[in-house]
């Protein structure tokens, strides 16, 4: 079985491929929604503006949701994590996938802190299991973003940059990370390896 990389033109596909390869798996990029029927897992990457997710047409959205409902693990990275929610203030008219409740908002931070939030920051781990199995509280990972998901019951780890927001979310086999695991060294590899383990049952 394969792990599908959803390509909606948001970039950073090469770095995600390298990160997953370092964790022991390979990604395939399906060209049609029906090809997701053969996948054992799905990864939604992302950089840039939330409006970019509007290129994921309804046929793709329906196929992704159908696979999630069938128990197939899904991982959203950065913008891909935000897309798991109902939407974002960055593009109010563009709906998210709606698998998790809540909307993403722009980070509020005062000087000397800057937005976008770019660089290494430490995780406050709430649940050290699932996607965060073996990841210690205080682990540093690499962020680059201006919008963030709220703290909800699905939050497994938070981070503070001017305010607290969700850094890792997980509900059953749906997970998301606001940072870039493929740029976060050994901790990022561990997180990707945990996701790969989810795809193998």
Image (tube, rainbow, N blue to C red):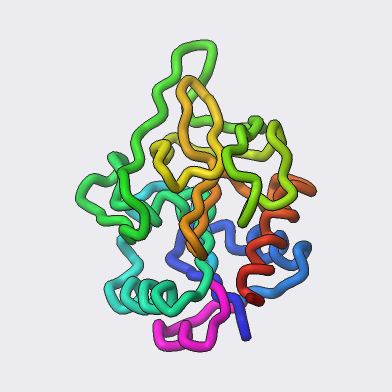
Please state which of residues 185 and 125 is positioned toward the viewer in this rendering.
125
Badge count:
0
Using the image, determine if residue 118 lies above or below residue 48: above
At horizontal 72% and vertical 45% (from top left) the residue drawn is 135
At horizontal 44% and vertical 35% (from top left) the residue drawn is 146
Using the image, determine if residue 151 lies above or below residue 114: below
Using the image, determine if residue 7 lies above or below residue 87: below
At horizontal 50% and vertical 75% (from top left) the residue drawn is 72
User: In the image, residue 109 lies at what x, y percent?
Assistant: 44, 19
Please state which of residues 152 and 32 is positioned toward the viewer in this rendering.
152
Quadrant of the image occupied by residue 26: bottom right
User: In the image, residue 152 lies at what x, y percent?
Assistant: 40, 41
Using the image, determine if residue 168 lies above or below residue 162: below
Left or right, 8 with reference to 18: left
User: In the image, residue 9 lies at what x, y percent?
Assistant: 45, 63
Q: Residue furthest left?
A: 93
At horizontal 71% and vertical 59% (from top left) the residue drawn is 19
User: In the image, residue 142 lies at what x, y percent?
Assistant: 65, 39
Does the magenta run of residues contain 14? Answer: no
Left or right, 98 with reference to 193: left
The magenta segment is: 28-41
In which quadrant will I find the N terminus?
bottom right
Please state which of residues 52 and 73 is positioned toward the viewer in this rendering.
73
Does the magenta run of residues contain 29? Answer: yes
Quadrant of the image occupied by residue 199: bottom right
In which quadrant will I find the C terminus?
bottom right
């Amino acid at each position: 079985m394969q792990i599908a990389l959803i390509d909606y033109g948001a970039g950073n596909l090469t770095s995600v491929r390298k990160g997953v390869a370092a964790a022991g798996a390979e990604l395939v990029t399906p060209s049609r929604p029906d090809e997701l029927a053969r996948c054992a897992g799905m990864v939604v990457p992302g950089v840039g503006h939330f409006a970019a997710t509007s290129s994921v047409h309804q046929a793709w959205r329906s196929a992704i949701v159908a696979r999630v409902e069938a128990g197939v693990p899904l991982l959203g990275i950065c913008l891909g994590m935000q897309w798991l929610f109902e939407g974002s203030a960055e593009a109010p008219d563009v709906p998210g996938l709606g698998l998790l409740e809540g909307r993403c908002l722009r980070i509020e931070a005062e000087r000397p802190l800057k937005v976008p939030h770019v660089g290494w920051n430490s995780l406050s781990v709430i649940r050290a299991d699932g996607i965060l199995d073996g990841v210690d509280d205080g682990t540093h990972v690499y962020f680059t973003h201006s919008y963030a998901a709220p703290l909800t019951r699905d939050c497994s780890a938070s981070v503070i940059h001017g305010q607290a927001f969700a850094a890792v979310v997980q509900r059953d086999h749906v997970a998301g990370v606001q940072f870039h695991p493929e740029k976060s060294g050994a901790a990022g590899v561990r997180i990707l390896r945990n996701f790969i383990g989810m795809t193998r049952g």
